[in-house]
Image (cartoon, coloured by chain):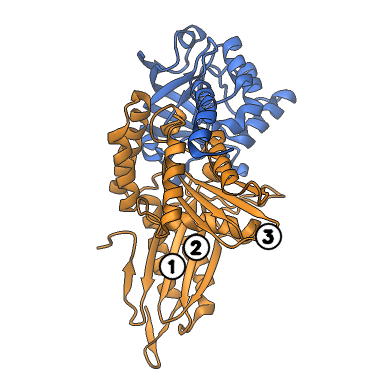
Amino acid sequence: MAVYRLKTPVSEKQVRELKVNDTIYLTGTVVTARDYAHRRALEYHKAGKKLPLDLAGLAVFHCGPVAKKEGNVWKIVAAGPTTSARMDQYEDEFIKNFNVRIVIGKGGMGKKTADAMKKYGAVYAAFTGGAAVLAAKAVKQVKSVEWTDLGMPESMWVLEVNDFGPLTVAIDSQGNNLFENVQTKAESQKPAIYKKLGVN
Amino acid sequence: MFSVHGAGNLLVTGELVETVAFKLLQLAVTELPQDVKDALHKAYRQETNQVGKAQLKAILDNIELAEKTCSPMCQDTGIIIFYVKAGSQIQGLDQIESALRNAVEKATCEVPLRPNAVDPFTQQNSGNNLGRHVPYIHWEIVPGNSLEITVLPKGGGSENVSALAMLTPGQGVSGLKRFVLDTIIAAGAKPCPPTVIGVGVGGGADIAMNLAKANLLKPLGEPNPDPELAKLEQELLQAANSSGIGPMGLGGKTTVLDIKVDYAHRHPASYPVAVVVQCWAARRASAKIYSDGKVEYLTHKVV
């Protein structure tokens, strides 16, 4: 359960050293993307269109923040993670095409994503769901906001963060999946729990 | 702000309702009721899994910071639902809905709340948390002369794992227990555990769901006044917490903070069971406006 302080861009080598249960504090550029930003990014890639910024070595954050404009400057008020499972349908292609090294979210991701992480070198790092003010505290600056037509939560927010964490590595690039382990164990408890409840 | 009409009847004005509803929205998203904070502190004290305990620590730190800075504790400030208990003698009832909508629009801008009302066909976010049937208002006409307003900002992550089962009467209580447990385990890490679970039984699909969700307005840790239901709630709570899913689904003792069950009589052919899941940020805020215009906040200390 080592503690890493990483700076973006993160290299494949750096990310392959991380193991489940390790803790990361991240400094640098984090880009938010939810369902529709993932979908659009992949549509852009397919059409040969460039994304608003190069995501290689950066962290993608499953988050739809609350932001407030003070004068001409956006300020992040609350920025906790959203449920990552919804992005499972896009994330393998996202990792493959854009070389993101860290995916930050909550609730874990499935096998398809974990396989891509193993193949291309990336990790999934969990931030405490709902801990939005703690997350916002780590945001030093909104560098830009892209695709605002998608609405505030779905826009792509390019954030400069400092010591963002603690992030728990929950899927590593060796194919270990902490959420899946907990879930499998819970499923295996079912017969014993049914028995205790007197469920037939 | 308000005026008293006739023989002490409350004449609600849009202005007063808007002011109170705005305050409720702000309180709800920035500060948890004491019973929820107590339940989370208790979970933290009892947790032995180090990863799970670290999650609870982050939750507690976050709650404190949100309160101190008057910021929304979670970026998902929910779909806004109001429960209104209107005294039958109140005048000006027709002003309440527009006042609540105004309060939501103002809170979106000033608290701020995340704009969370999206047209399901055009995918356009309205930008102000107003939309068709949003905010949703549950009306109850009660005897008397006061107006009670409760706001429930309901997050999407936990709502997404809520479920309804139209069981057969033969499956009955045994089927209910199985369905509640299966729903909690299938939800796993997704709804930001430790969660609060509302269970509604009987009535019909809509009635069961409504009862399940209204359970989220009850204070945590208070046993059901019906001893049989209190027993069932405890049994389900222990079952859920023996799953080991734990805080944020990273493992641990507390998967669920509390389970609340309510019921309606059922059709002989039906046995509906609704399970509504609420994340750890079990936000709610209530206030009562009396006939003399006095406002009492029921869930929060307001100075």
Marks 2/1 in contact by CB < 8 Å: the verdict is: yes
3 or 1: mark nearer the eye? 3
Chain (orange): B
Q: Amino acid at mark 1?
A: Ile
The residue indicated by pointer 3 is: B268
Which residue is denoted by mark 1 in the rendering?
A: B149
- Number of residues whose C-alpha sits closer than 10 Å to that of mark 1, classed few (under 14), some (14–19) or many (20 or more): many
Residue at which label 2 appears? B82
The quadrant of the rendering that contains the N terminus of chain B is bottom left
Q: Which one is nearer the viewer's eye here, A141 or B110?
A: B110
Give the CA distance from mark 3 to mark 2. 32 Å
- Say whether disc 2 or disc 1 marks the residue closer to the N-terminus: 2
Chain identifier of the residue bearing label 3 in the image: B
Amino acid residing under circle 2: Phe
Looking at the image, which residue is at 31% across and 59% down? Answer: B300
Q: Is residue A10 visible to us here?
A: yes
Q: Is residue B108 visible?
A: no
Image coordinates for residue A113, horizontal then vertical, percent: 60, 20
Mark 2, other Cα within 10 Å: few <14 / some 14–19 / many ≥20: many
Of B157 and A10, the residue lying toward us: B157
Q: What is the residue that sits farthest to the bottom in this orientation?
A: B6
Query: Can you tell which chain is drawn blue?
Result: A
A31 to B74, vertically: above or below: above
